[in-house]
Amino acid sequence: MTNAIAPLWRRFPRVCSNRGEDRGFVNWLVQNFSKRLRYAVQNPRYALRSLYRELTLADERFLGRLTGAPARKIRRLLNEPIRTESFASCLRTAEENFQNLEIQSADLYAKKILVQYAAVRALQPEIIVETGVANGVSSAYLLFALHLNKGGTLYSIELGDPQYLPVDKSPGWVVPAWLNSRWKLVIGDSRVLLPQLLMQLGPIDIFIHDSLHTYEHMIWEYRVAYRHLRPGGLLFSDDAAWNSAFGDFSREVAAPQAEVLRGVGFLRKGFA
Ligand SMILES: C[S@@+](CC[C@H](N)C(=O)[O-])C[C@H]1O[C@@H](n2cnc3c(N)ncnc32)[C@H](O)[C@@H]1O
């Protein structure tokens, strides 16, 4: 290796490595490849920034700091759902369903879901609370993580708004029956149900906001949930870049670790 190439090699170690677990970065990236390519052509700056983060393992390093796991392990975890046939086939079925129903679904293989999955695998939580289920894509990933962890329960609160669902489908229909045993889904408004649920549960390990993305609702959910988060526990917020609620809240609680990855806000509660 020449001296000119060596620094590059060191900078992008995982991509240049021949180790099977590390080469897998292509796994999730090649799903929906044509859609991703089209998006990259339309948003070249975003694509370049994402590629740079991918090559330098920036997301994995941050999640590693958050959960105490090595970045290389996080990279391996990101590939697990797609490599596990039982779960991958459930994603394919969901995709077919969306196509048959002629519904434009969210990207079932988006890294924004995978980073949440990997954090749950790495942290091994006992109690996760999420708001906003809709079809249940993120719930399915979270439940698959708990399934492989062999522990933990996901408590989900969903309003049941039909505008987010295909006709004749109920909230969380994407979740396969074999993942149901670790899931407690309640239908209703998080404004009412979230404080009640948190009072019953005691300290929780992870809170995930993905319900109503208004500034007021987001910061309200963060404040309510944060009080019940154990020290070292994590808060995720989908679509955190839609407004300044996540940034404002991170400053409000002086979160020692807070960042937005792929549109998802992550913060860790301090131990003080
Ligand atoms: C963005 S979707 C959730 C997507 C889901 N996490 C997924 O991965 O497929 C937002 C969901 O939040 C629900 N929602 C909105 N306001 C809510 C509230 N106040 N309480 C509970 N759920 C709410 C909506 O009904 C909708 O299903």
Image (tube, helix red, strand yellow):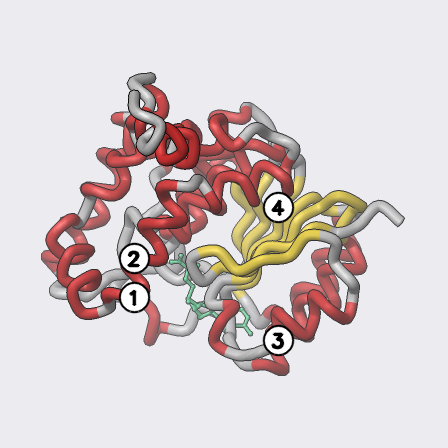
Q: Which mark is residue 128?
A: 4
Question: Which is nearer the N-term, disc 1 or disc 4?
Answer: 1
State how far apart marks 2 and 4 are (Cα): 34 Å
Question: Which is nearer the N-term, disc 3 or disc 4?
Answer: 4
Q: Quadrant of the N terminus?
A: top left
Q: Residues within 10 Å of mark 1 (few under 14, many from 20)?
A: few
- Judge from the rendering whether residue 31 lies leftward or rightward of residue 57; answer left or right: left
In the picture of the structure, the residue carrying the numbered disc 3 is: 245
- Give the SS element for disc 2: helix
Which residue is painted at 49% across and 71% down in the image? 241
- Judge from the rendering whether residue 36 lies leftward or rightward of residue 144; answer left or right: left
Discs 3/1, front: 1
- Amino acid type of the residue that numbered disc 4 sits on in the rendered structure: Ile
Q: Which mark is residue 48?
A: 2
State how far apart marks 3 and 4 are (Cα): 21 Å
State how far apart marks 2 and 3 are (Cα): 27 Å
In the picture of the structure, the residue carrying the numbered disc 1 is: 45
Give above or below for 184 relative to 84.
Answer: below
